[in-house]
Amino acid sequence: MTRQTAQLEKLTHAAAGRLLARARDRRGLNAKTIAPRLRVTLEKYLLRAQPMATARAIDEFFDKLHADDLLCVIACERGDEAAWQELIKTQTSTVLSAARSASNGAAEAEDLAQSIWAELYGLRARDDGKPAGKLAYYSGCGSLGGWLRAIVAQLAVDRHRRTARLVQTEDDAEFDALAQDSKQAESNAFSSHASHNPEQSLAEREMVAVVRDALTRAIAGLDPEDRLLIKLYYFDDMRLREAGALLGVHEATASRRLARAQSDIRKGVGKILSRERKWTTHEIARALADSNEFATPKDLQSLLTQEGETLRVLGKGER
Amino acid sequence: MQTNLDQEMDKLLRAHGAVASRAQNEQRENFVESSHLDADALSAYIENALPAATRAHYTAHLVDCAACRRLAVTFASTLDIASKEIESDVAASEKVASKDTAFEQTTTAITPSAAQSAIRNPNSAIKTDWRARLAAFFAPSFMRYAVPVFVIGIVGVVTYIAFNSSQRRQTSAPDAGLVASRTESSGTSSAVAPQTASNANSSSDAKTSAQNPTTKQVVTASAPAKPEPPSIAAKEPQDATRKDERARVNEKPNDAPQTSTQSESVSSGAQLAQSTRSAPPKSANAATDELETVERKQQNEPARREQDAQKAQTSNAETQAATNDANKSGNDLSTVASGAAATQSRRATSGMAKKAESKDKEKSDRDAQSGAAGGLAFGAARTVAGHRFQRQNSVWIDAAYNSQKIINVARDSEQFRALASDEPELRRIANELSGTIIVVLRGRAYRIR
């Protein structure tokens, strides 16, 4: 392990030299100063997933870091006023834009932006040199602007949760309420559909459960990114555009992926039902159609819609 | 944008999602904080700046962690780069990453920078995207198809230009040959009479004609009895002698009115005969040998004889339309000879004939020299009735011909007579040129056979 550690140190030191060479402004930093930060980044983003990463993979990882942004942040941590001025000058618009997107008004956005700068500025490197504050968590993997936007989003979510606890409009509470209502509605729906035929209602309920189980397993069999897309779109009610941005693809690409995922899920459900239940194609199609009707009856859907609208108005939803 | 989504599955998944979300929210309290994505990891994830294994790890976490997804949703809403983001290049780069490193480097270099610029300054995203697309245009994966297409295009253009220029060169080759021959001859006056290829005379006749310049009808040894290949050894001294002879012939004025029908051959036979008189005394055997060598050379060029006969015809037709029949038999050497002799006296009294004669002599001289240089299959040119014809593979082609539609007309046909009545020059052309003729009249091309 010592040998491996020594090798890692050597690679990190060499990478620090290359990073300094790449940077537009070295800001008075040297390889010895930035090597520890690089080592932490390496551990976090590469060695945790690939403990036996090759030297070439390590070099490639380091060479993709944003040199200028990282050196600027490190210089800010060390109290470089010129670096701070440059950071404020270049990133003010980004922070303000992100704050506006995450807030409901100009005043709130301004307040949020000021909070960000205060947290960053007020938590510079301590006298003992140990990193403090959020600046220490910037690795250089992503861009500085992206990181600042993520900071703004994190702060906005935290603020929203703190203020939303006072009113029953938190997402959890929203879903809890919906859950109770929907359960009640489901039972009502089933009872209304099969009010005069208990056996039929039992069969229908069982069929819905079987289909739902097959759905869950079919979704679990998708690729992780397709699963994430399904969850973002159907579970988190995210728009395709936002889901695509999260996955790093265009909205059109996300739409095509979603359509493909739906097709894969349908095939997966069909395979499971035909293999385990010995259902025919016709029976599977009928089961899906019936499950659709029973799982989202019109009265339940309208109920969910009404409740959702009410809660969103109160909770100043994120979307 | 929801294109081609399965409506039935869409509804099922929505219902399923609602139920699953409720279940997840109930378990939210059990999440381990340290395993969640922080702001740095989230931004790196969205910018696709993580190693593949790490990204897959975070993807799996996001699938199961509603809290992190919620944060990601909030973060995504702050991004306004969806419309400027790279489309399927990211997915394509991930798929072909193992196949084409250069392409991967190009596209992975694009993605973070495009996202970074878009995040920093949305207005610059357009420029970055433009640069990224330009860089992708020159990526090896694209250039490996574009370069061969470009090369093929260049080769096609060059071939087309070369083909066109070679065609033009072919049409202007006689002129070039004539120009070249002009440079050789010291004078272009009427010194040299056109060849009469027809006069089939023996070497004795050549000697006889050498003594009488006005009746030089010999020269082009047309006797097929001596079909011997030209002697290379004899050729070299012959060339030098020929130049001298031409120079002398050009200097010497002609006594009688010289017509194109004058059967004095441009060939070196007659000139040689002349030079034998004025040149330093040589042995009789040497002169005879040279003459025989020249005759042999001429005998072995049937094409040259044909050209001489045709030139004799041309000179006749320009002066007399009544000699059509005689001129038509241009391949008959004896006929040409008699025709030439017959018209000689006629032209002697015509002033116009003198001018035509001088022109014809010059042209014939050029043609003869070009013919002497390299055969008659290509390059012989004649001007008749203002039309410039070039002989190509036994067809006289008008220089004005430019691949128009050709109308076939037979000599002695009603159509020909009708045309000739409208276009008198057509008759003259048909009379003076033998064989197949392609002539352009009033923008229409006619093939006279």
Image (cartoon, helix red, strand yellow):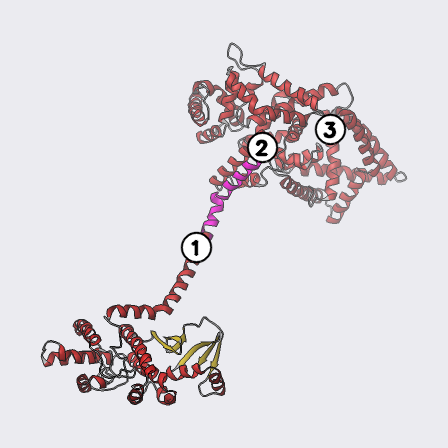
The amino acid marked with disc number 2 is: Ala
- Give percent across and percent down for residue B314: 34, 82
Residue under pointer 1:
B154
Q: Disc 3 vs disc 2: Cβ atoms closer than 8 Å?
A: no
For mark 2, what is the residue?
B118
Return the disc, 3 or 1, that comes first in the chain's sequence. Answer: 3
| Mark 3 and mark 1: Cα distance apart in space | 66 Å
- Left or right, residue B221 beside residue A54: left
Q: Give the overall secondary structure of the magenta segment.
A: helix
Q: Is residue A117 above or below residue B373?
A: above
* Label 2 SS: helix
- Label 1 crowding class (10 Å Cα cut-off): few <14, some 14-19, many 20+? few
Q: What count of labels does the image hold?
A: 3
Q: Residues within 10 Å of mark 2 (few under 14, many from 20)?
A: many
Say which quadrant the C terminus of chain B sits in.
bottom left
Start and end of the magenta stretch?
Answer: B122-149
Q: Mark 3 or mark 2, which is nearer to you? A: 2
- In-front residue for pair A173/B288: B288
Tag 3 subunit: B
Tell me the SS state at disc 3.
helix
Quadrant of the image occupied by residue A144: top right
> Is any atom of residue B449 visible in this view?
no
Residue type at mark 3 is Ala
Q: Amino acid at mark 1?
A: Ile
Tell me how far mark 3 sits from mark 2, CA to CA.
37 Å
Badge 3 is on which residue? Answer: B23
**Label 1 is found on which chain of the structure?**
B
